[in-house]
Amino acid sequence: MPSRNRVEVPEAKEALNRFKFEVANELGVPLKQGYNGDLTSYQNGSVGGYMVKKMIQEQEKRMAGK
């Protein structure tokens, strides 16, 4: 089944991919290029959740003018 995930701004795709690997590294999740079916849903979810948390924090800082 094809993935339904899409990047809203195609120019940001590579930056988001790098960000995903940075977050995985911070969390100690052994994410690698290509197939990652050996990771648990908890590991994958923690990467996605932490990415969202960091993006929200950054946007809040920008909105507060910091």
Image: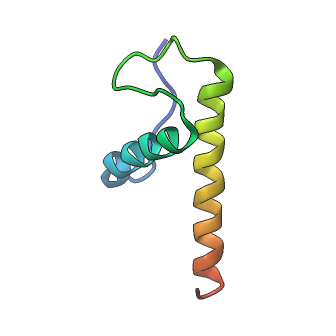
Task: Give the answer, above or below, for where 62 lies relative to 40.
Answer: below
Image x and y of residue 22, in percent: 44, 46
Q: Quadrant of residue 49?
A: top right
Q: Nearer the viewer, residue 8 or 35?
A: 35
Left or right of 32? Residue 44 is: right
* Quarter of the figure with residue 66: bottom right
Q: Position of residue 7 (x, y in %)?
A: 44, 44
Please state the horizontal and vertical placement of residue 30, each as a whole percent of the image. 47, 26
The residue at 63%/81% (across/down) is 63
Residue found at x 50% / y 33%: 5
Q: Nearer the viewer, residue 58 or 23?
A: 23
Q: Is residue 51 above or below residue 60?
A: above
Left or right: 23 as drawn, with respect to 56: left
Residue 14, image x, y percentages: 31, 46
The residue at the point 47 percent across, 40 percent down is 25
Q: Residue at x 38, y 26 (%)?
A: 32
> Above or below — where is 24 with respect to 61?
above
What is the number of callouts on the image? 0
Image colouring: rainbow
Above-or-below relation of 60 to 33: below
